[in-house]
Image: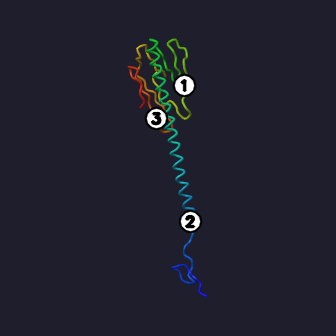
Amino acid sequence: MRTRHPPGRRAGEARTDRRGFTLLEALGGVALAAILAGVATVRLVELVDSARLAGAARTIATALRLARGRALAAGGSLEVRLDAVRMVLELHDGGGALLETRWLPAGVRFAALPARDRVQFGGLGTAQNATVTLSAGARARSVIVNQRGRVRVQ
């Protein structure tokens, strides 16, 4: 009786088609996956910091624009006070009464504040030049107010 062999193989030849991975290949794959996961984690942290910083800068800019609009509508002065210790922004009317409070998100801090830690808007919407710089990690953004009261994020 003749034994049948797969085509291309003769009787007595060892099987050469292996399935699976060697230990060295498996360890190489695991090492590569660990390196990629580490890089992705660092990038994710940077992305989260960047998003928090951008959101905080928009929040500050919005509060300053709101203060300018209220000053124009009321025909009086409004003041935005920035507290670097408590990481808070407070909107006060001309008499000093607190109208609104906003906190910075976790991980974002004031890196530089204008003189006297405040921005004041007059009844015509004008203001003193001011720059509020925020930072998160190695990144920073500035909110700039010009003399006409215009606010921009840079």
Disc 2 + disc 3, Cβ < 8 Å: no
Image quarter where the C terminus lies is top left
Identify residue for label 1: 102
Identify residue for label 2: 24
SS at mark 1 in the image: strand
Q: As shown in the figure, which amino acid type bears the numbered disc 1?
A: Arg
Mark 1 and mark 2: Cα distance apart in space: 56 Å
Mark 1 and mark 3: Cα distance apart in space: 19 Å
Which of 130 and 10 lies nearest the eye of the viewer? 10
Image quarter where the N terminus lies is bottom right
Disc 1 + disc 2, Cβ < 8 Å: no
Q: In this view, does 108 lie above or below 33?
A: above
Q: In this view, does 143 lie above or below 92?
A: below
- The mark that comes first in sequence, 1 or 2, is 2
- At a point 52% along the width and 53% down the height, the residue shown is 36
Identify residue for label 3: 140
- At a point 55% along the width and 35% down the height, the residue shown is 107
Which of 151 and 11 lies nearest the eye of the viewer? 11
Where residue 84 appears, as percent x and y from the top left, is 53, 27
Q: Residues within 10 Å of mark 3 (few under 14, many from 20)?
A: some
- The mark that comes first in sequence, 2 or 3, is 2
Q: As shown in the figure, which amino acid type bears the numbered disc 3?
A: Ala
Q: Which numbered mark, 2 or 3, is in the foreground of this view? A: 2
Q: How crowded is mark 1: few (under 14 residues within 10 Å), some or many (20 or more)?
A: some
